[in-house]
Image (cartoon, grey):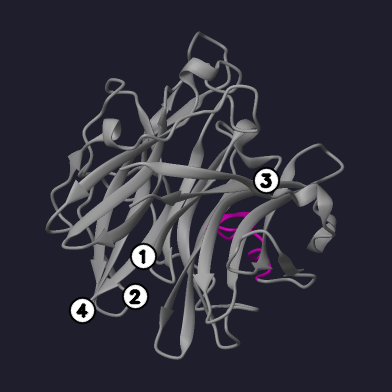
């Protein structure tokens, strides 16, 4: 499985984004139209106290992924109400067509005192071809539970027959590298199903992918594409500590496959996609999103600094 990089295709600093955002284009997610591709991403604005708020924006591109047709100048979806699960940001939002609507599954962020943040998954629906989204409600459709105590985020939804499948990330807890250090979270990938995309049944606490880096490996942002009769999952993984500035402990993109969407075999070595020395993705690869564009399998992803400087694209070679 050889992926050919096309380089960085979008830099948020080159465009005027809504809410005055100038930094980050994280977790790109594609919605393919007949003659262009709309790519949603999370961008940020810094508040006076130095903290960030994450907002959803999008860029429309020609299918050559070089020419930009336009960038959203409006609010795609407002942040949540006071005290709600998505009050302080949405990062990321996965989009999927359902009938004549577009469902947006959001990762809501809300700040905490003892740890930086918690999160849950919400649903918003668009009736204008994904230009704007309205919440199905102020609360989440998937949230922490008995065996998934924190940070239920990073949804990816795929409709197969009459069943909605969601792969998502759930937190096992927080740890400190040394006493008095800032805590870091540990999270794994889980699976849930639904008959309507609203009421979900999850396999509470079941980790569907084996660890490669030990029990404290962090796994994030799953995405699933079907090639032939086999399903392929791409995700990113890293060490728990010292991952922000140590490239050897930073995110890399992993791969797993399944024939039934339930049992997954991890096969990272089949990816043939790694960092490029001296380039925008020299230190890390993270937040992948797989999709097909006119029959061509594509993979959007972020590079260094968790997408601060934009996102790139790779295509699967025959």
For the residue labelled by badge 1, is the local secondary structure a helix, a strand or a loop? strand
For the residues marked 4 and 3, what is the alpha-carbon distance in whole angstroms? 35 Å
Per the image, is 80 magenta?
yes
Q: Is residue 31 above or below residue 14?
A: below
User: Marks 2 and 1: CB-CB under 8 Å?
Assistant: yes
Which stretch appears magenta? 77-92
- Residue 229 picture location, percent across and down: 16, 62
Residue depicted at 35% across the width and 42% down the height: 149
- Residue 142 picture location, percent across and down: 38, 61
- Residue 44 picture location, percent across and down: 73, 49
Mark 2 surroundings: few (<14), some (14-19) or many (≥20) residues within 10 A: some
Between disc 4 and disc 2, the foreground one is 4
For the residues marked 2 and 1, what is the alpha-carbon distance in whole angstroms? 9 Å
> For mark 4, what is the residue?
161
> For mark 3, what is the residue?
310
Tag shown at residue 197: 2
For the residues marked 4 and 2, what is the alpha-carbon distance in whole angstroms? 13 Å
């Amino acid at each position: 499985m050889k992926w050919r990089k096309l380089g960085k295709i979008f830099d948020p600093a080159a465009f005027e984004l809504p809410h005055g955002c100038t930094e980050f284009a994280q977790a790109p997610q594609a919605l393919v139209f007949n003659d262009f591709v709309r790519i949603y991403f999370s961008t940020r604005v810094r508040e006076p106290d130095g903290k960030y708020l994450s907002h959803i924006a999008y860029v429309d591109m020609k299918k050559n992924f070089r020419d930009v047709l336009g960038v959203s100048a409006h609010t795609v979806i407002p942040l949540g109400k006071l005290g709600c699960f998505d009050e302080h940001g949405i990062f990321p939002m996965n989009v999927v067509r359902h009938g004549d609507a577009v469902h947006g599954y959001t990762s809501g962020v809300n700040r905490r005192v003892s740890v930086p943040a918690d999160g849950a998954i919400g649903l918003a629906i668009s009736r204008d071809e994904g230009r704007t989204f309205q919440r199905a409600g102020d609360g989440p459709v998937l949230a922490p539970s008995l065996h998934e105590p924190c940070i239920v985020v990073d949804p990816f939804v795929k409709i197969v027959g009459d069943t909605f499948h969601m792969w998502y990330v759930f937190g096992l807890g927080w740890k400190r590298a040394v006493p008095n250090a800032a805590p870091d979270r540990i999270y794994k990938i889980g699976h849930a199903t639904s008959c309507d995309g609203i009421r979900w049944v999850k396999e509470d606490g079941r980790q569907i992918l084996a660890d490669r880096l030990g029990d404290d490996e962090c796994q994030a942002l799953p995405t699933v594409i079907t090639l032939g009769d086999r399903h392929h999952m791409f995700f990113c993984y890293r060490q728990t500590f010292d991952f922000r500035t140590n490239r050897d402990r930073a995110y890399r993109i992993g791969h797993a496959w399944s024939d039934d969407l339930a049992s997954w075999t991890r096969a990272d070595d089949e990816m043939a996609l790694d960092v490029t020395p001296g380039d925008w993705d020299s230190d890390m690869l993270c937040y992948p999103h797989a999709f097909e564009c006119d029959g061509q399998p594509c993979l959007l992803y972020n590079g260094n600094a968790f997408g601060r400087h934009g996102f790139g694209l790779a295509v699967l070679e025959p």
